[in-house]
Image (tube, grey):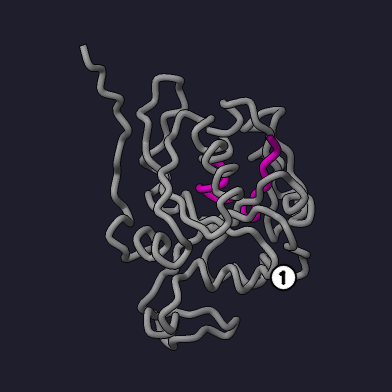
Amino acid sequence: MKVGFIGAGRMATTIGRHLICAGHEVVLSSSRGPEALAGLVADLGPAATAGSKQDAAECDVVILATNWADAPAALKDIDWTGRILVDGTNAHMGEEPDISAAGVARSVAALEGRTSSEIVAAMAPGARLVKSISNMPMAWIQDFSPQKPKAVLFMSGDDRDAKAVVGELINSTGLVALDLGSLADGGAMQQLGGPLSAVELHFVRRVVR
């Protein structure tokens, strides 16, 4: 599978390396342009390329791996209709004012009862949005070996088929996808400040003898 990343920071390089180790290809993009990513893609190897955000958006699955405040600009000017988009952002709250100049909510009150991923979905109309990947610091999943711990990455969304694709992708890396349900209910549990945010779980298969 070919996976595009909008954003080329720690999340993109960490998840990108897990995907490459599982035999997938990745396309990294950033606001700095493809040329600025030459060192990163060289480090990731021949299964990684740098491109524009449009190149990333044309992949089988697209992962939004930007800072929360950069999401509106990152999602702009792309036709998201039918595309599988994974929201990997974390809505960092508590800043003033409540709404930034870019129109991004900066407080829980400013979310007006919606999850941060529901807001991302509104920024990418037509996308088949799945919330995932951002429930734990990337520093916790830096083991890329075949024997790595089966760390759980939560996911939630309203499109069952899109979740199935994202779940299969995550499971292929040796990490484990756990479906929390809808974007509203599951997203609230795993988003920053939710009860499952920054919770490290490992899947262990019990053998009955």
Residue displayed at 54% across by 71% down: 69
Residue holding disc 1: 76
The residue sitting at the left extreme is: 209
Q: Quarter holding the N terminus? A: top right
Q: Position of residue 202 (x, y in %)?
A: 31, 35
Is 73 positioned to the left or the right of 107 in the image?
right
> Percent from the top left, x then y, of residue 41?
67, 37
The magenta stretch is 1-13
Q: Which image quadrant for residue 200?
A: top left
- Left or right of 13 on screen, residue 81: right
SS of the residue under disc 1: loop
Give the residue at x 68% y 47%.
4
Q: Within 10 angstroms of label 1, few (less than 14), some, or many (20 or more) residues? A: few
Q: Is 130 situated above or below 77?
A: above
Q: Quadrant of residue 60?
A: top right
Q: Is residue 206 left or right of residue 137?
A: left
Question: Can the viewer see residue 101?
Answer: yes
The quadrant of the rendering that contains the C terminus is top left
Amino acid at the residue labelled 1? Lys
Q: Number of labelled discs?
A: 1
